Amino acid sequence: MEIYMWWLDLDLDTKEWLRENLRAEELPLPVLQGIAEAGGPHPDNPAAVLSDADWDFIETQSEFVD
């Protein structure tokens, strides 16, 4: 599922963590849970949760006024 379809449902703490840790190789469990609860991917490999396109979205398209 494309990030723009679940980003708005993501909790603010998770959004902030993702913005502050752009392109992190590993995501902490609370971040993974936040992504899953918002309707994002449920990967077996935590490192594969977000694609390069997802990180690009977080870096350039997400708004800080969530």
Image: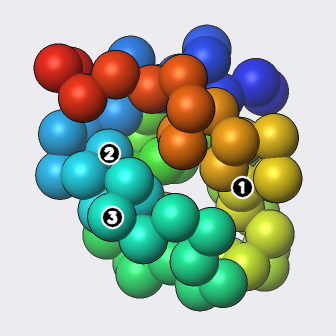
**Which numbered disc covers residue 15?**
2
Q: The residue tagged with tag 2: helix, strand or loop? A: helix
> Which of the two residues, 26 or 60, is positioned nearer the viewer here?
60
First in sequence, mark 2 or 1: give its number.
2
Residue 24 lies, in percent from the top left, at 57, 77
Residue at 69% across, 42% down: 56
Q: Circle 3 is placed at which residue position?
A: 20
- For the residues labelled 3 and 1, the Cα–Cα distance comes to 15 Å
Q: Quadrant of the N terminus?
A: top right
Kind of residue at disc 3: Glu
Amino acid on which disc 2 is placed: Lys
Disc 3 element: helix
- Name the one closer to the observer, 54 or 11: 54
Q: Which residue is mark 1?
A: 50
The residue positioned 59% from the left and 85% from the top of the image is 26
* For residue 22, above or below residue 58: below
